[in-house]
Amino acid sequence: MSIQIPRGTQDILPGDSEKWQYVERVASEICRNFQYKEIRTPIFESSELFMRGVGDTTDIVQKEMYLFEDRGGRNLALRPEGTASIVRSYVENKMHGLANQPVKLYYTGPMFRYERPQAGRYRQFVQFGAEALGSEDPSIDAEVLSLAMSIYQKLGLKKLKLVINSLGDLESRAAHREALVNHFKTRIGEFCSDCQNRLEKNPLRILDCKKDRDHELMSTAPSIIDFLNEESKNYFEKVQQYLTSMGVDFIVDPTLVRGLDYYNHTAFEIMSNAEGFGAITTLCGGGRYNGLVKMMGGPETPGIGFAFSVERLLAALDAEGVELPIDQSIDCYLASLGDEAKDFTVKLLNDLRIEGISAEMDYLDRKIKAQFKSADRLKAKYVAVLGEDELAQNVINLKDMSSGEQQKISLESFVEHLKQKCQ
């Protein structure tokens, strides 16, 4: 019986992996322009980290985490998201004491959730995210939103919608929470069991429920906007002012919520309006989480961040028909005739590669015509032919595949000559 790939995972094969590399490289370069530094955290962590950091009322913790016990009896989990690990590292490594504040970080890597696989949604998926810790200036909120939008726009996406909302400060959240409980409690029996459990623990999560989203009480639920105090209103207005000055288009949506207790003030999502993209249009989500660092055992520290699935980003690029500018060609193909020429070609090939020239040769002892076909498939810019006669004359024939021009180059100067051509 053949062993097959686990359900909800995928092989990213050559031809596609270059797209991933390009996307991740562009995102990383933009993060560096914004002065965000890369951080790498473990793929598995203490399960308590995510129960505390993500929230024990969330579907992620209750239904989707991959949990296991190691040989030392420790309860561990494959990471379902990135923020909790970043904050754990921030606290553990005392980054709040660094001279440069706020601490601005980005990350990329595989995450794991036991979800029902569907188009663009996997049980192992790659997430790219950024976090800014140590400032509660609304300009950082605008910066993080601009960073996320810049990545999508730089990659060529145009049919985007940035939706923002304010969840207010603790005082505003408390007033809204009480209003939500009063709104739902008399008819909570009509809702799913998850919503019934959330009523007292985290009523904001009810508004995220997919099962009960069409219930009539959902459309009449109190809006957080109506409960913002003066300070929260001013903060949200300042974020909008900065976004407008940056030229970042956005829509305010009072129904947008982030259902975790530590979220406050700015919440946002970036969506795709591309035709045929699918029912799930959200590409990226994020928000401010001023209580999370303290919850993880650190000092009172404000933070804001976002994360997006690379799989969904690539799907959005496909939906808009964006062709990434990926160069699949090689610089040179070395074709050889005869055993002595082949022996010399092995060394010559290595010399080219050491000098930074992408090069390939034949490993199947094919005829010269088949070697040229192989060079065409590899989109070689140049083909260098070395036979017994050329070897005796200490030269090599170099053909420019775009112009058809051919010239003889001495073997001693060939590497440097080709290096000059490929610069």
Image (cartoon, grey):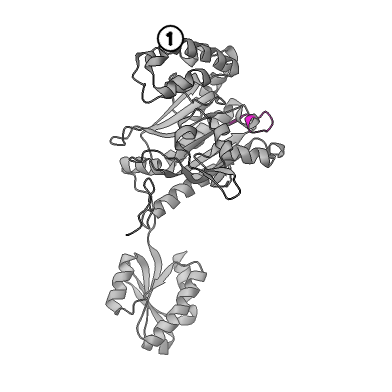
Q: How many marks?
A: 1
Look at 37% across and 88% down and name the residue there. 388
Q: Main secondary structure of the magenta part?
A: loop
**Nearer to the camera, 88 or 239:** 88
Vertical order, 136 against 18 (above or below): above
Name the residue that disc number 1 marks.
Answer: 186
The residue stretch that appears in magenta:
295-303
Query: Can see residue 218?
Result: no
Q: Residue 171, position in %: x, y?
A: 59, 15
Q: Position of residue 92 (x, y in %)?
A: 67, 40
Position of 327 compared to 127: left or right?
left
Front-most of residues 159 and 308: 308
The three-letter amino acid code for the residue at tag 1 is: Thr
Residue 322's x, y, as percent? 34, 44
In the foreground, 184 or 289: 184
Circle 1 packing at 10 Å, graded few (<14), some (14-19), many (20+), is few
Task: Check residue 297 for magenta coloring.
Answer: yes
Give the position of the N terminus as an image quadrant.
Answer: bottom left
Please indicate whether residue 376 sits to the left or right of residue 233 in the image.
left
Residue 368 can be seen, yes or no:
yes
User: As displayed, is residue 301 above or below residue 392?
Assistant: above
